[in-house]
């Protein structure tokens, strides 16, 4: 086992996939010799050549459209969108095409492909280098949406995504790229998609979170524990398709739920979790579900620390549902 | 229209002035019959739609030579990324009218399992005629990506993607042309300039001097061809295909033609197409032009058209009857093929839909348990 940052784990995952499968191709803007703006693809062109890891023209629509064509014709494309904020020119290709090919062709044509993209705030990126757009994509049957929060999961989920027969949007929490380190197995392994990870055990309040919100939730839970409130923290890590039964089980265990995400609140991912609980297990609930989210505003720059949920806001919500 | 003179082979009189088309009598007959089959399919679908038996159709009258001429330049191992007005290409390569009719009815035998609107075909044999979607131009960069895959495997497959004049304004046209130019991908971009994007004429679509000239900016050849001249389309697309096959990169072909019907059966072109324009193009019918050529070559005589068209109508009519008698897709097909493996939430939703349909006595639930 090596101790890697989340970014290094992504890089290791890409290299592992390219070594095990010659049909894996990596491409996007500046991912070649430069190694990507965050260096996630560093060294790939050198090891695998410029046919298998290469720069494309500056066109997200072209990147994803071409990836779909490669996938239709037997390759395993793993393309990068430089920032999730720039993915929207490719929205049509993702939503109308990649996610629907299997269905609309009765299984004749399929798109086994991965779109990797850094998302989220915490780097003073302002409106266009900070957004969390997961909810747009979780509304798209045919697509899978994955968000790791540890180096171990980043590599394992990426390898599982690349091996998956369906298109996967792999959202990487850029705030954690270099700020978290962890042990990562060498070589090939995978973390199955649509499974939850219990981050911390507790019987008083359940906190559902993912991506860069996981370490914030852990910090809040440590403070809550000091006050005698033990929290069960669940990292959702595959947002879609979600392990709904696992979520309901975890919610039932405490009867008090906090959902955390950076994205705006209205129609955000937390709304789905809340609705799921209300529809299925309302009789187990001791308190209304609390959501700790970004505001329903564009993402600010200078005051981003006010916008992003942190341990302070999460602890507040934990105490609120605990005391209800 | 521009000053650029389209490449033409068959003159209006039918003469070809010594042009060596290199096609056998059998190949020419197949082209001719396929054009009549497109027209028979069209005529039949229009009647089926007007009588309420199918919901929708896309007329092809006037553009048959573009489709068949282009398809005739491809091998069965090549791929077609079509628009929704291209099914003559599939027919040329041996897709059966019955398989298409199943799609028009959206029945259980439809390759798309009744999930798509009519005319949104998908075939993976005898040629890759890639599943059609309704958004315009999205298939263009996909053809380029598929071509990249073939290049990497050192295959000599060629990828033809077809779109209309309206398609050249799409995001996909720009990104697809740009990527193909940079990658020197084996792609033929076929723009069937049929005069209108639904109701929008060329002068409101672009300020450019036609469409072929746009190729220059992407570093590839652009060629204008008379789209109502089957042999000219075959020649120009054939040259582009061979160039691509030999590693010479992509080509944009603009085929000038005219859509004699509406955009779809939901459209009334008399609201926006001047009568004189229709009269002008009616005299330039691609099938009649090809007949005059065949007659001069000694391969066609009066009466052949009626006999062959009747044959095609019978085949298409029988296909329509068979498709109409074919059952609807089972309810489970709403939930299958979303993913390779059905996730738990879809299994639950499918079971609930099945239980409700069974409880209410809705035959579409089919027999047995969900999923079957």
Image (cartoon, coloured by chain):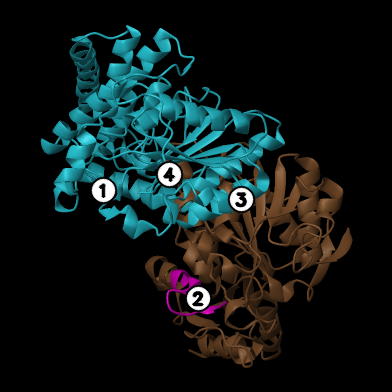
Chain colours: A brown, B cyan
Can see residue A194? Answer: no
Marks 4 and 3, Cα distance to the nearest angstrom?
Answer: 26 Å
* Residue position marked by numbered label 1 in the rendering: B356
Mark 2 residue element:
loop
- Residue visible at 18% across and 14% down in the picture: B306
Q: Position of residue B88 (x, y in %)?
A: 35, 28
Q: Is residue B198 left or right of residue A214?
A: left
Q: How many marks?
A: 4
Of the two numbered discs 2 and 3 in the rendering, the one whose residue sits closer to the viewer: 3
Q: Is residue B3 above or below residue B365?
A: below
Give the letter of the chain under mark 4.
Answer: B
Marks 1 and 4, Cα distance to the nearest angstrom?
Answer: 62 Å
* Residue position marked by numbered label 3 in the rendering: B179
Q: Find the magenta span and give its range.
A: A261-273
Which residue is most to the right? Answer: A2
Of the two numbered discs 2 and 4 in the rendering, the one whose residue sits closer to the viewer: 4
Pointers 4 and 3 in contact (C-beta within 8 Å): no
Mark 3 vs 1, N-terminal side: 3
Pointers 1 and 4 in contact (C-beta within 8 Å): no
Q: Position of residue B9 (x, y in %)?
A: 41, 25
* Residue position marked by numbered label 4 in the rendering: B4
- Residue visible at 71% across and 37% down in the picture: B152
């Amino acid at each position: 086992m090596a101790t890697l940052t989340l970014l290094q784990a992504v890089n290791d995952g890409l290299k592992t996939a390219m070594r095990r499968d010659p049909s894996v191709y990596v491409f996007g803007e500046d991912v070649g010799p430069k190694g990507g703006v965050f260096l996630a693809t560093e060294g790939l062109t050198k090891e695998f050549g410029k046919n298998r890891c290469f720069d494309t023209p500056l066109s997200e629509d072209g990147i994803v459209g071409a990836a779909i064509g490669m996938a239709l014709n037997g390759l395993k494309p793993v393309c990068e969108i430089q920032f999730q904020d720039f993915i929207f020119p490719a929205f049509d290709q993702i939503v109308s095409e990649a996610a629907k090919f299997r269905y609309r062709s009765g299984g004749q044509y399929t798109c086994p492909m991965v779109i990797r993209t850094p998302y989220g705030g915490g780097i003073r990126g302002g409106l266009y280098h900070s957004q969390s757009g997961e909810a747009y994509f979780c509304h798209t049957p045919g697509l899978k949406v994955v968000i790791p929060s540890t180096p171990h999961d980043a590599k394992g989920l990426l390898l599982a995504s690349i091996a998956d027969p369906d298109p996967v949007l792999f959202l990487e929490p850029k705030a954690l790229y270099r700020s978290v380190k962890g042990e990562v197995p060498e070589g090939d392994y995978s973390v199955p998609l649509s499974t939850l990870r219990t981050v911390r055990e507790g019987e008083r309040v359940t906190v559902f979170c993912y991506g860069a919100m996981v370490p914030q939730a852990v910090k809040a839970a440590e403070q809550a524990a000091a006050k005698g409130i033990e929290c069960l923290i669940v990292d959702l890590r595959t947002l879609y398709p979600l392990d709904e039964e696992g979520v309901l089980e975890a919610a039932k265990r405490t009867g008090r739920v906090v959902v955390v995400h950076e994205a705006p609140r209205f129609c955000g991912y937390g709304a789905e979790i809340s609705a799921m609980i209300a529809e299925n297990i309302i009789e187990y609930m001791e308190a209304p579900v609390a959501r700790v989210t970004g505001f329903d505003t564009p993402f600010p720059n200078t005051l981003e620390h006010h916008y992003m949920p942190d341990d302070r806001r999460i602890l507040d919500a934990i105490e609120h549902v605990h005391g209800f | 229209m521009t000053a650029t003179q389209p490449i033409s082979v068959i003159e209006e009189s039918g003469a070809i002035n010594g042009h060596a088309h290199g096609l056998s009598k059998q190949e020419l007959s197949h082209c001719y019959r396929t054009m009549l089959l497109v027209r028979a399919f069209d005529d039949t679908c229009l009647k089926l739609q007007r009588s309420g038996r199918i919901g929708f159709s896309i007329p092809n009258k006037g553009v048959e030579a573009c489709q068949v001429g282009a398809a005739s330049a491809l091998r069965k191992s090549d791929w077609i990324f079509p628009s929704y007005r291209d099914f003559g290409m599939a027919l040329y390569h041996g897709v059966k009218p019955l398989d298409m009719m199943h799609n028009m009815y959206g029945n259980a035998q439809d390759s798309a399992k009744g999930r798509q609107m009519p005319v949104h075909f998908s075939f993976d044999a005898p040629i890759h005629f890639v599943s059609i979607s309704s958004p315009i131009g999205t298939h263009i960069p996909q053809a380029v990506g598929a071509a990249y895959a073939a290049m990497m495997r050192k295959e000599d497959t060629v990828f033809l993607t077809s779109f209309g004049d309206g398609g050249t304004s799409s995001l996909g046209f720009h990104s697809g042309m740009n990527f193909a130019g940079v990658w020197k991908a084996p792609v033929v971009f076929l723009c069937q300039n049929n005069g209108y994007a639904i109701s929008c004429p060329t002068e409101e679509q672009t300020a450019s001097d036609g469409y072929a000239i746009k190729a220059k900016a992407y570093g590839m050849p652009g060629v204008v061809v008379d789209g109502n001249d089957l042999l000219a389309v075959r020649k120009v697309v054939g040259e582009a295909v061979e160039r691509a096959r030999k590693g010479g990169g992509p080509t944009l072909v603009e085929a000038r033609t005219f859509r004699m019907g509406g955009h779809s059966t939901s459209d009334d072109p008399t609201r926006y197409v001047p009568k004189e324009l229709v009269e002008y193009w009616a005299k330039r019918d691609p099938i009649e032009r090809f007949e005059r050529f065949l007659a001069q070559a000694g391969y066609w005589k009066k009466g052949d058209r009626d006999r062959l068209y009747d044959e095609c109508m019978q085949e298409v009519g029988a296909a329509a009857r068979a498709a109409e008698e074919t059952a609807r897709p089972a309810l489970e097909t709403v939930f299958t093929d979303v993913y390779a493996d059905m996730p738990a939430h879809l299994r639950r939703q499918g079971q609930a839909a099945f239980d409700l349909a069974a409880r209410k006595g809705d035959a579409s639930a089919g027999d047995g348990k969900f999923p079957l």
